[in-house]
Amino acid sequence: MISDLFYTLFKYKEKAQKDALGYYPEKVHVRAFPERRFLWTSRFLVVISCLSICFSMILSSILCILLPMKKTGVVPLQIDYERYQVTRMYPSEVKVYAGDLTVESLVSDYITARYTIEDDYDKYKNKLSDGSFFYSASSEEIYHAFELTEEPYFDLLQRKGVRRQVKINRIYPVSMDFWQVRFSTIDTAPDLPLEEFMELMKVNLDSAINPPKQGDPLVTNWIATLRMKFRVHREENKDKALINPFGMSITSYNLSYMGNNIKTQRH
């Protein structure tokens, strides 16, 4: 096949012949067709040109496939002062996965149930006891640590007349099962003296610039970092399964203090 192609292009038989009369442009100079003297050279250059074009097309195709960015555009950035990061500025309306919205709602309910302190003691204990969403959504280790550390302190605050509301400021995923929650606790104790209230809340007023007045709320900012997993329900009782229908289980929980609304002097 290749030999036939070269035979057609270069015609070795015709060149091998000695008949000068039959090969007019080889022996006689014709001014009208000077390029016919270079017939063999032009054929060779045509072959090289075709190969070069094919190679260039292949190389261009590879470059188009491998280029990571085929076009440029303006990417607006902003400073996230809460997370201390430079993030991309998104439009006012964005598309969010339904799964992320579900997890956000469950995490919000979990944080609210964990830190809210109400007037009714029975209602306050029921939302933390066995059979509650908080109990179902906590792993055994997390719930046991809560019983030993936070729950006795919250019980003391409830008996002393401290009432707490929870305000969720922001919930965002760090990875698929790793989330952070920025929230504030608003504590009030109108019937307690200010000094006793601040002592219960472990707040030192010695360095306060503007000390709070009697009855003023104490607003404390926190960051909760948690990991979770979703398990398949094996409950025979449908009512218990409906308490935590998605089977969320908090496997790791850490809380960071981010200050309060009482300004203090820096030394």
Image: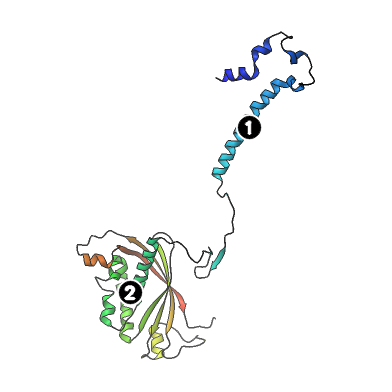
Residue 9 point in image, percent of width and height:
63, 20
Disc 1 secondary structure class: helix
Residue picked out by circle 2: 113
Q: Which residue sits at x=35%, y=76%?
A: 115
Apparent side of residue 39 relative to residue 88 in the rendered image (left or right): right
Left/right placement of residue 237 relative to residue 109 reads left
Say above or below: 211 vs 6.
below
Write the residue at 62% across / 30% down. Answer: 51
Residue drawn at x 30%, y 80% is 155
Residue 124 rendering spot, x and y as whole percentages = 29, 79
Quadrant occupied by the N terminus = top right
For the residues marked 1 and 2, what is the alpha-carbon distance in whole angstroms? 72 Å
Q: Is residue 192 above or below residue 58?
A: below
Query: Disc 2 marks which amino acid?
Result: Ala
Colouring of the image: rainbow
Reading the image, the residue beneath label 1 is 52
**Looking at the picture, does residue 206 appear above or below residue 10?**
below
Q: Earlier in the sequence, mark 1 or mark 2?
A: 1
- Element on which disc 2 rests: helix
Viewer-nearest residue: 200 or 212 = 212
- x, y percentage for residue 54? 60, 33
Q: Nearer the viewer, mark 1 or mark 2?
A: 1
Front-most of 26 and 102? Answer: 26
